[in-house]
Image (tube, rainbow, N blue to C red):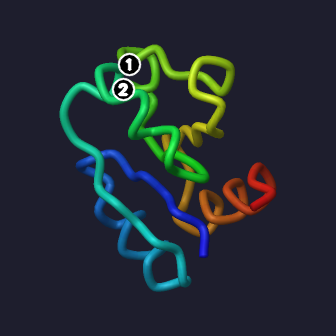
Amino acid sequence: MKKIGVEQGLSMVADYLSGQGFSVEILGGDLRSNASKCESFDAIVTSDLNTDMMGFSETSTNVPVINASGLTPEEIKKAIEQRTTK
């Protein structure tokens, strides 16, 4: 089962992914100070605003970061499946 970190405020996405069999954890606070925690996820879903503010990218976290802005929960699931290999 893939473990997905979902930014606080994206509860619709978290609920959908959980219903699709993913292990979902809501992420809150300053994610940069918790980079080691982020490494435990197979992917992280965040909003466009916080992707820029947090400065996350695949190269800095080694975990795919999915920008949820403008995507449906189904599209986010597809992106997770395409970008994870575990």
Element at badge 1? helix
- 33 with respect to 40 (left or right): left
Q: Please name the residue that numbered disc 2 is placed on.
A: 50
- List x then y, in percent, for residue 15: 36, 74
Q: Estimate the spatial distance between the alpha carbons at disc 2 and disc 1, rounded to whole Å.
A: 6 Å
Position of the C terminus, as image quadrant, is: bottom right
Residue 23 against residue 85 in the figure, above or below: below
Residue 15 against residue 85 in the figure, above or below: below
Nearest the eye: 59 or 79: 59
Q: Please name the residue that numbered disc 1 is placed on.
A: 54
Q: Nearer the viewer, mark 2 or mark 1?
A: 1
Q: Which mark is residue 5?
A: none
Q: Residues within 10 Å of mark 2 (few under 14, many from 20)?
A: some
Q: Residues within 10 Å of mark 1 (few under 14, many from 20)?
A: few
- List x then y, in percent, for residue 25: 34, 60
- 5 with respect to 58 (left or right): left
> What's the residue at 60%, 67% (across, down)?
2
Task: Name the residue type under label 2.
Answer: Asn
* Total numbered labels: 2
Task: Name the residue type under label 1.
Answer: Met
> What's the residue at 29%, 62% (across, down)?
11
Nearest the eye: 74 or 4: 4
> What's the residue at 43%, 52% (across, down)?
5
Place residue 35 in its image quadrant: top left
Residue 54 against residue 84 in the figure, above or below: above
Residue contact between numbered discs 2 and 1, judged by CB atoms under 8 Å: yes
